[in-house]
Amino acid sequence: MPITVHIRDEVIPGQLSPAESVLVSQAVTTARELIRSRIQQEVERHNQSLPEVFCGLVQPEESERILNGFRMKVRRPLDWNAQFEKACAGFQRNGFLLIVDGSQISELDEPIELRAQSEVQFVKLVPLVGG
C-alpha cells in the first residue's frame, strides 16, 4: 500500500530544507526505492515548469551549483533515470547519508519500514576546502 512520507535535506553544517512530501509505493521498502521515488517525483515537478534552478538531490549535467540548488545553463527537461543513477552512485560513495527515523541506512537494498510519521533525511556532505 502506498505511503506518503516527508523528506528533508540537510547540508552539514546545519542548513535544513523545508519538508517535501514523497509518495512511496510500499511501506516496507529499500533505500534504493526510496531514492527512486524521491528522484522521480522531483524531476517530474521540475519538468512541469522548467525553472532556471533545479532544487534536487543531485546535480544535473550542464548546471552549476548555487546556494539553494543548481542553475541550469539551458532550461530543459531532465531524465529521472540519469538522476537516479547519479543518486545511487552518490549514496554508495557516501556523497550523502540517508537517515530514517534516526537510524542511518547504509545499504541500497537494506529493508526500511516506513510509517506516515517517519522522519526521512538526506544529509548532504560538503567536501572540505583546502583541507
Image (cartoon, helix red, strand yellow):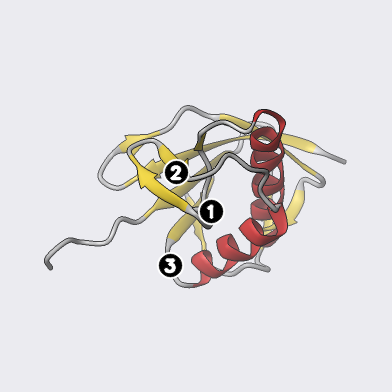
Q: Amino acid at mark 3?
A: Asn
Q: Amino acid at mark 1?
A: Pro
Do the CB atoms of the residues marked 1 and 2 lie less than 8 Å apart? Answer: yes
Mark 3 surroundings within 10 Å by alpha-carbon count, few (fewer than 14), some (14 through 19), many (20 or more): some
Above or below, 122 against 85 in this view is: above
Residue for point 25% across, 45% down:
13
The Cα atoms of the two marked residues, 3 and 1, are separated by 18 Å
Specify which label sits upstream in the sequence, 3 or 1. Answer: 1
Residue for point 45% across, 57% down:
97
Along the viewing direction, whichever of 119 and 58 lies nearer the viewer? 58
Q: Pointer 2: what residue?
A: 70
Q: Pointer 1: what residue?
A: 60
The Cα atoms of the two marked residues, 1 and 2, are separated by 8 Å
Above or below, 118 against 129 in this view is: above
Residue 5 placement (x, y as % from top left)? 66, 35
Along the viewing direction, whichever of 34 and 47 lies nearer the viewer? 47
Above or below, 1 against 83 in this view is: above
Residue 16 placement (x, y as % from top left)? 38, 34
Find numbered disc 3 in the image and state the secondary structure of the residue it sits on. loop
Q: Pointer 3: what residue?
A: 94
